[in-house]
Amino acid sequence: MLQFQQFKKSYAGHLALEIDKMTIDPGIYWLKGTNGSGKSTLLKAIAGLLSFEGQISLNPGIDLKKQSVAYRKVVNFAEAEPIFPEFLTGQEMIRMFVTAKEASPGQEQYYLESMQMQHYIGLPISTYSSGMLKKLSLLLAFIGQPKLILLDEPLITIDSDSLQVLYSWIVEKYQNDGTSFLLASHQALEHKILSKAQVFWVENRTLKAIV
Ligand SMILES: Nc1ncnc2c1ncn2[C@@H]1O[C@H](COP(=O)(O)OP(=O)(O)OP(=O)(O)O)[C@@H](O)[C@H]1O
């Protein structure tokens, strides 16, 4: 599903993360690691938000650098602490993502309703609480037909009912569409399927599968 070749990310000349060669099969993965180990760096690099050395590609042969538009259409990302333009409404953000990701019209309705976001989605983002903003960013990560969804600390700030809805979105998307997930979380995934997700550990500036 996802391939790394001679991947290296440095900040101001200091190596943060290196993956010489690795293939990740389709699935749901739980990305763990101590603070500062490189989880967000990895997710942002895979999302195409950071410059790096080497190659990241998605099967079949969609290279992040060479086919950047095609790649970004099918790799979605929700940041740990999302920042969106405050003068836009959630609805306007959704409209932008629907266009960029070539989503089917009305796809967002299911997500808006199940997460009970309809009452605020037409308001400017400046009026949102951190949980309301987090739910918007999670919804945006499900827009389109992603092959891979990257969620950085998806469990923080949302209430327990919303958490159960998010778990169901992830499991449904994987089971119905075969979408893979990389979930970076310090909190346990308390769900009967997700708790069995294969673990990847980021340590010593690299990525290791825990078998
Ligand atoms: N913009 C940046 N400039 C310089 N160094 C950075 C930058 N972003 C991250 N780093 C460094 O890269 C390393 C990995 O950081 P990263 O944010 O990826 O860790 P993390 O595993 O997501 O941490 P946490 O669990 O605390 O969120 C850290 O040493 C951090 O100081």
Image (tube, rainbow, N blue to C red):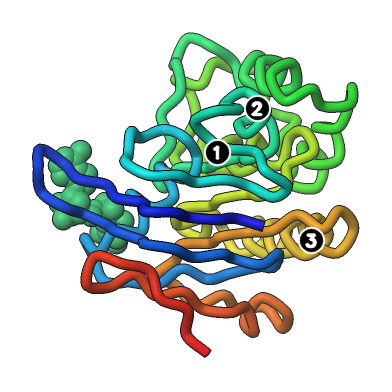
Residue drawn 50% across and 40% down? 47
Q: Is residue 91 above or below residue 190?
A: above
Q: Position of residue 144 (x, y in %)?
A: 77, 33
Q: Which residue is identified by label 3?
A: 174
Q: Quadrant of residue 202?
A: bottom left
For label 2, the crowd category at 10 Å Cα-Cα, with few meaning under 14, some 14 to 19 and many 20 or more, is: some
Q: Quadrant of the N terminus?
A: bottom right
| Sequence order check, earlier mark of 1 and 2 | 2
Residue positioned most to the left? 13
Amino acid carrying label 2: it is Tyr
Q: Which residue is identified by label 2?
A: 120
Label 1–label 2 contact, CB within 8 A: yes
Q: Helix or strand or loop: what does disc 2 sit on? A: loop
Along the line of sight, the residue nearer the viewer: 131 or 149 = 149
Q: Which residue is identified by label 1?
A: 132
Q: Is mark 3 within 8 Å of ligand 1?
A: no
Along the line of sight, the residue nearer the viewer: 45 or 87 = 45
Closer to the eye: label 2 or 3: 3
Q: Is residue 122 above or below residue 128?
A: above
Q: Position of residue 125 (x, y in %)?
A: 51, 21
For label 1, the crowd category at 10 Å Cα-Cα, with few meaning under 14, some 14 to 19 and many 20 or more, is: some
| Sequence order check, earlier mark of 1 and 3 | 1
Amino acid carrying label 1: it is Met
* Side of 193 where 135 appears, left or right: left
